[in-house]
Amino acid sequence: MGPYAILLGMSYVDQNSDAAYAVLVNQAKRFPKFAEYVKTAELDSNEVKTLPESAFAFPECRQFPVYSDKAAAVSYAYAITQKLPVTITERIKEALEVFGIDPCTMFSAPIEKVAAETNPYLLPDLKLFAVRSASDVKTAQEHLLENITKLDLVHRATA
């Protein structure tokens, strides 16, 4: 952490200050596309010491390197876990854009597939109005409307 961070009372975690890479590992678990992309990234703190300030999104503290596509992606992974000044986040996003990386795609969580319901009826306890596919919805609706008066109030409200 540089003198500016201490002076301003800021403490941000990036790939150079996360000694055990705990944040990075967690982000890789959350975002599989990111994990795949950066699995060959090299995080060399000695190399970072030789870079110019322009290679960082937060140059005053030499944090959040953006000198390569992988460095920018890793910096973004750290950035989204904390509240950073907008200027830092924008610099990281600009670097991602330069490298052709869409953060919305790379940092989207996988959609969990939900198992199909085993009971495909609108009224399962009566086994009425089967809906197994999208095309069954209209048919079930028509049958429901034709037979609504035959149902008690609880089942009407449920359907």
Image: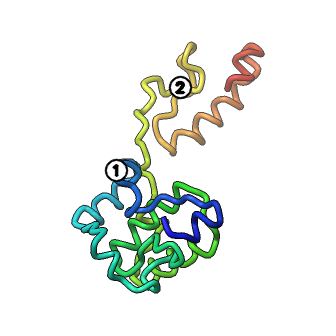
Q: Position of residue 121 (x, y in %)?
A: 53, 25
Q: Is residue 51 above or below residue 2?
A: below
Disc 1 is placed on an element classified as helix
Please name whichever residue, 41 or 62, is drawn nearer the observer in this view of the structure. Answer: 62
Which quarter of the figure has residue 10? Answer: bottom right
Quadrant position of the C terminus in the picture: top right
Real-space CA distance between mark 2 and mark 1, rounded to the nearest whole angstrom: 43 Å
Whether residue 93 appears in this view of the structure is: no
**Mark 2 Cα-neighbour bin, 10 Å: few <14, some 14–19, many ≥20:** some
What label does residue 121 carry, if any? Answer: 2
The picture places residue 27, in percent across and down from the top left corner, at 40, 52
The residue at 28%/72% (across/down) is 46
Mark 1 lies on residue:
25
Camera-near label (2 vs 1) is 1
Q: Residue at coordinates 33% horizontally, 72% vertically from top-left?
A: 70
The amino acid marked with disc number 1 is Val
- Give the side of residue 38 with respect to residue 120, left or right: left
- In front: 99, or 4? 4
Identify the amino acid type marked 2.
Tyr
Between residue 124 and residue 2, name the one nearer to us.
2
Question: Residue at the spot x=46%, y=70% of the render?
Answer: 63
